[in-house]
Amino acid sequence: MNNQTSTKVNPWLIAAAVIVPTFMEVLDTTIVSVSLPHIAGSLSAATSEVTWVQTSYLISNAIVLPASAWFSSFFGRKRFFLACVAIFTLASGLCGVAPTLGVLIIARVLQGAGGGALQPLSQAILLESFPPARHGQAMGVWGLGVVVAPVLGPLLGGWITDSYSWRWLFYINLPVGLLAIVLILRFISDPDYVQASKPRRIDAIGLTLLTLWLGTLQTVLDKGQDEDWFSAPWICWFTVISVVSLVALLIWELRSPNPIINLRVLANRNFAVGTILATVIGIISYSPLTLLPLFLQNLMGYTAIQSGIVQSLRGIGALLVMPLVGMLTSKIDSRKLIIVGILLCAVSGFRMSNINLEVARSSFILSNFIQGLGLALTFVPLATTAMELLPKDQIGNAVGLFNLMRNLGGSIGISLVTTMVARGAQAHQAYLVTHLTPLDAPYLSGLQAMQTTLGQRVTPAQAQAMAPGAIYNALLQQSNLLAFVDDFRWLALLCLLSIPVVLFLRRVGSSRKIAVH
């Protein structure tokens, strides 16, 4: 017996039913990022306060994501899937009508909780609905939502906010959610092993430890740089709680007869290695989504829409190659595809590390397009290879853990690159400022040139007074530029360092059957 779900429904109809809500959920992780200033102004909130609109969603999303398999076995997978889509849709409507920031944050918590299980559930359903030889195609279609949606989010969010209102970022989910509910009711059914499974006892301790670990960890990652990390006592306490909760969770889940997260699935080598690589891919995928808008808008003067257009080429690159990768996965050693994809991501990173303040927009467009190709070539075969040898009753739990680590990798990456930009700019500034002295010949030459340039607009006395400040502003720009360059180089280096890890994956042939329980 293989891992194919016995069903008379066309698997592509099932794919449509699960892709629609998944795309909607992943889109909402980034669609509000460019609209936070508008939300702050509309609700009379400070910029530091409104960031919780993003943080609250990510925290609740992360808590539910790894526990999705347990909830599915307790409530029934189709019933749980429907409930998640309904909660997400209703919470979206509540976000749109929120009169205060507090209501909006509560609604975002509900929205994240409803959306947290959609990724692993949709992936598990697709893997069971398609035969093993077509798993690559299934993951190619699923990857369209997971890879393309975060890239389109800022572009779509900027356009909707500028053209209408930030509230429509949430209202657009209402018809999509209703369509998803209709498709799920019509085409999704629970496989025999899910229907035969008995509801398990609630793992209250595991759920509590999971909530403490992910809630405190996500908060530290999102707010650490704003609070100067461990100089803030509450960051230190949250870090301690997170570490202790994680250790306790690992011990409890390995000893519990009914764990909320079955960690024993990591005994499968392909899944363990694939999960490590998924974490790295999360860093590589989400970090540029944070770095590029900061660079383009703060240093290059791009608008939010212009920044979104530049980034959208990454989504177009992935969109073009994803269906092809799905077919190639069943014909070519997936490890080769993964390595080629990671190398393309490295090339993109090295290209972006050669930027300067005079760089043309076409350079960013090409680099983003190359990265989109690389992510598509990496993600689809990695997801397929990691799950291919698992028993079908372990896939639901495995995809939850796999997606959790990918999302955590994204959170860690975003936190690291923002910290490195801020502190790298300070380090470069401290070094460069040592050259702004009367004893430095290039500085004196530049000062005289600046005075001459300014003298064409103001009086000589004013030009002499303004020139040092203008040169110092240029130094600040260069310091920030060098910090971004460093970040892109580190991301490219991380790509190269992850290639040897791919070799630990076992080759899985297209005709090889998935292990049975």
Image: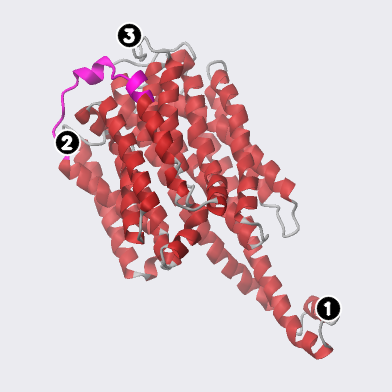
- Specify start and end residues of the magenta stretch as a single range: 183-203
Residue at 56% across, 15% down = 331
Which-is-in-front pick, marks 2 and 3? 3
Residue 343 appears anywhere in the view = no
Residue at 51% across, 28% down = 380
**N-terminal label among 2 and 3:** 3
Q: Label 3: few (<14), some or many (≥20) within 10 Å?
A: few
Residue 445's disc number: 1
Q: Position of residue 517 (x, y in %)?
A: 27, 17
Name the element at disc 2. Answer: loop
| Residue receiving disc 2 | 256
Task: Name which residue type carries label 3.
Answer: Met
Q: Position of residue 28 (x, y in %)?
A: 44, 44
Task: Name which residue type carries label 2.
Answer: Ser
Residue sitting nearer the eye, 23 or 346: 23
* Residue 199 within the magenta-colored segment of the rendering: yes
| Residue receiving disc 3 | 1
> Marks 3 and 2: in contact by CB < 8 Å?
no
Name the element at disc 1. Answer: helix
Q: Residue furthest left?
A: 201
